[in-house]
Image (cartoon, coloured by chain):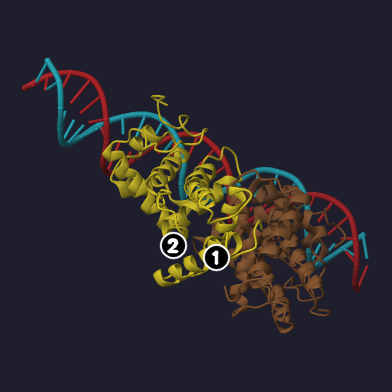
Chain colours: A brown, B yellow, C cyan, D red
Amino acid sequence: MTDGPTFREKSVLHNVPEIDTSEALTERQKAVLDAALRLLVEEGDQLTMTAVARRASCSKETLYKWFGDRDGLLTATVQWQASKVRVAQVDGKGLDLASLTASLERFASDWLKVISSDTSIALNRVAVGHAGSGKDNLGAVVLENGRFALAKRLKPVLEAGRQAGLLKFADAETAFRTFFGLVARDVQIRLLLGDRLELTEAAIGGDAARATQQFLALHGAKTGPQGL
Amino acid sequence: MTDGPTFREKSVLHNVPEIDTSEALTERQKAVLDAALRLLVEEGDQLTMTAVARRASCSKETLYKWFGDRDGLLTATVQWQASKVRVAQVDGKGLDLASLTASLERFASDWLKVISSDTSIALNRVAVGHAGSGKDNLGAVVLENGRFALAKRLKPVLEAGRQAGLLKFADAETAFRTFFGLVARDVQIRLLLGDRLELTEAAIGGDAARATQQFLALHGAKTGPQGL
DNA sequence: AATGCGCCGTACCGTACGTTACGGTTCGGC
DNA sequence: GCCGAACCGTAACGTACGGTACGGCGCATT
């Protein structure tokens, strides 16, 4: 990880233990993938193998040797970035309304930062573009490390909140999706479709707080109407 | 480059008003665009001009004459479809809670049907794919006829609901985005990324009802906490 | 020093596809 | 019946780019 051109997400993601699907990448390979990633952000799906080679100061032969073909390079790049992006892990200790609220706001804020980052937008664009045809992979990878990873982290928090009598819901999956909707709203699709939509730090914080309060209004045990 | 007056440069920049019925397309041209649209749904962005010509039983020369170039054809196709898709118009008469609820459910249901349709998915895919690079158009067109058109239809309903004392919110735009988030949740991004996710008629109806109830819980004048 | 390996740089090949050109056919107007 | 316009079908052109081959160089091992 010597290299590391600083990505926007850097502040968001917390280097997570092992897990890693990053199967034995040498430093040099990581550097090449970082170069490919930067180019992907700049040029989108129409980056060329030649351009990647030039940017990474490596030969095309090496690219093909390491990644097989263009699709392999793209997949490796997406996975490489995915292995870096992780939303915060929150443990379910010390459960009171304040800490639950803080956790939810944290998740919301992190998620908004991720989906509004240039890197995420570029990755989602290329994944969407490849989703329609042939062997997909990319879409599944992005989904797995994005929306589903978020769910995997958030659900235990929701469950803990329910155990502690702070939340009320029938199905954690449904509750998560409600939270997801309240947080993301139309942001991602607008960004993917090219809508300028600058999210300042302050705006993100405000949206996170709003979404959290709305979610608590719907699923908080004390305040809201239950079961919606 | 024989003649100039293709409609590439015409109406792309400014958002289309309300009724703009597909400027002066002959029946034959509409048929060709329908063929292109069908092919777009099947093959995605990698459809070829040859394939379109063959499918539409027209010559490539005609395609270029009518639509300028590949991008023009794509744009015309997207606009043509966009001119066909319109969510329900609802007038603000007879405002009681029942009719307001029914209207909201209708909007939600219509919207879910739209975004889960093959056509919409294909169109959004190609628009997203083209959004990153160069002259965008497609993303703006899809956005204008999708999310923004929906807002334009729904906001008067929300306003009318507020006037009638049925809803409470500070900003119609924000309220709309909340509703949008509650309805769409993660559906669109998952579909765009290739996630199988079959929405049955029943499921859509259920989701529409749930989203509506949640929205009313947040913004209903009587039940919910105001201002969220 | 010699050998071998991994990689860079670059020239090269094959092909797919956007775009153009052109001959042939239909059709409406005179 | 003739003319021109519009259009179909297809061949041809140009090019960009994915993929491959090859020569040279640094470096490690012997």
According to the picture, the residue beneath numbered tag 1 turns out to be: A136
Amino acid on which the number 2 mark rests in the picture: Ala
- Please state which of residues B183 and A222 is positioned toward the viewer in this rendering: A222
Q: Residue B98 carries which label?
A: 2
Q: Quadrant of residue A95?
A: bottom right
Q: Quadrant of residue B193?
A: bottom right
Q: Which chain carries label 1?
A: A
In the rendering, which numbered label is found on residue A87? none
Q: Which residue lies furthest to the bottom in this view?
A: A163
Alpha carbon of mark 1 to alpha carbon of mark 2: how far?
Answer: 45 Å
Residue in view at x 55 percent, y 46 percent = B130
Q: What residue type is labelled 1?
A: Asp
Residue A162 percent location from the top left of the image: 70, 81
Q: Does residue A107 appear to the left or right of A225 in the view shown?
A: right
Residue A53 appears in view = yes
Local packing at callout 1 (Cα closer than 10 Å; few below 14, some 14-19, many 20+) is some
Q: Residue at x 78, y 69 (%)?
A: A103
Which residue is depicted at the point 35% across and 35% down?
B61
Q: Where does the C terminus of chain B fall, quadrant-wise?
A: bottom right
Q: Mark 2 lies on which chain?
A: B
Could you tell me residue D30's position as x and y percent?
91, 73
Q: In which quarter of the image is residue B70?
A: top left
Q: Is mark 2 on a helix, strand or loop?
A: helix
Q: Position of residue B59 (x, y in %)?
A: 31, 40
Q: Which of D14 and B77 is in front in this view?
A: B77
Residue B74 versus residue A146 in the image, above or below: above
Q: Which of the two discs, 1 and 2, sits closer to the camera? A: 2
